Image: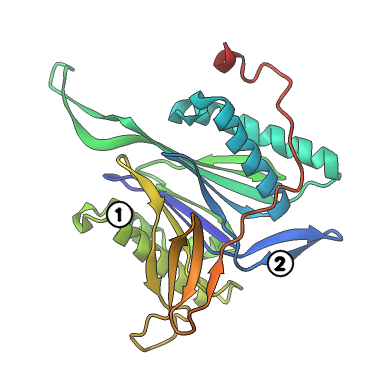
Amino acid sequence: MTLIAGQLFFQGLVLIADSRASTIKNGKIVPWRDNTQKIFLLSSHLGIGFAGDIEFAGSIISFLSSQIEKRPLLRNLHVFYSKGPKLIRYAYKILSEKTGEKRPVGFIVASLDPNRPEPIKNEIGQITGHIGIYDKKLFKISFPEDSFEEAKLILMPSLVLGSGEPAVRGKEDSLKKLLFCSAMNSLYFQAFLIDLILRRKIKELGIDTVGGLSQILIIEPKSSGFLQYKGKSDLDDSTDILDIELIIKNDRLVQHNLITGKETPLLFPPEVMKIKDPESDLFADLDS
């Protein structure tokens, strides 16, 4: 189970995940499904991905989605950056109390403000124009340790969650070069290369993963959406044959086997436990 996100200097943000999810049974972590959707658009420029327990993740993401529907101000980058972690902590606390368990689960949140390009200032500080670098936020929050980490555009432009985390070690320079390489002029191609580098490294390390293509969400100033593309289910295959593609069909991500024609829709995480609205002043400034 791996989730990685990066913020690209000149364009936007990218979230990448495999399709394997786990849950807890009898106190042990066990596989749930190998065709699980793990990345979602909560609004036009706000994405979230998870790694860890599918039941906690499904309930928390559903809770966040409902809160954004009720309170549109949460779609604002800086409002969600302030309120989002508090909402996630609140939801995790409720689920832990209901189940009596502190299950391992983590989230990466990526958002962009398409209305705030970086200003250009002259020698006396006056704004003379804008360049295509937009205000972005990228952070992860993990439980049960309740750790919070924010990506920094220059020093640490990417974040990773899950069992594939060791694959990033030693590849930081390669990732940073890709994230800052505007010469490609294609965020989609950069995301594809990042995914390929990580999949190969994960395989080299012998980390248990799942076949099929990764889910790749692109968040850009003008639009956001999932990458539809073709690839190989087996990276060791030396032929030029692309045997699988990820497509969107009936508003669902689908793994399509190009050899057999079989289509495997990615499953949404189940909302096993409902989470009630916070009975606090958490939203006082949004509801007034």
Figure quadrant of residue 112:
top left
Say which residue appears at 40% left-offset and 50% top-offset. 225
Which x, y percent locates residue 211?
54, 75
Task: Give the residue at x 51% y 71%.
Answer: 202
Q: Which quarter of the figure is the C terminus placed in?
A: top right
Assess whether mark 1 and mark 2 are in contact (beta carbons under 8 angstroms): no
- Between the residue at mark 2 and the residue at mark 1, the CA separation in whole angstroms equals 32 Å
Mark 2 belongs to which amino acid? Pro
Q: Which residue is mark 2?
A: 31
Q: Is residue 83 above or below residue 49?
A: above
Of callouts 2 and 1, the N-terminal one: 2
Q: Kindly identify the residue that appears in the image at 61 percent across and 60 percent down.
A: 267
Residue 35 coordinates in the image, percent (x, y) = 60, 66
Query: Considering the numbered disc 2 on the image, is that residue within a helix, a strand or a loop?
Result: strand
Q: Residues within 10 Å of mark 1 (few under 14, many from 20)?
A: many
Left or right of residue 260: residue 61: right
Indicate which disc residue 187 carries. 1
- Residue 158 in view in this figure: yes
**Circle 1: residue type:** Leu
Relative to the observer, which residue lies in front, 102 or 232?
232
**Secondary structure beneath label 1:** helix
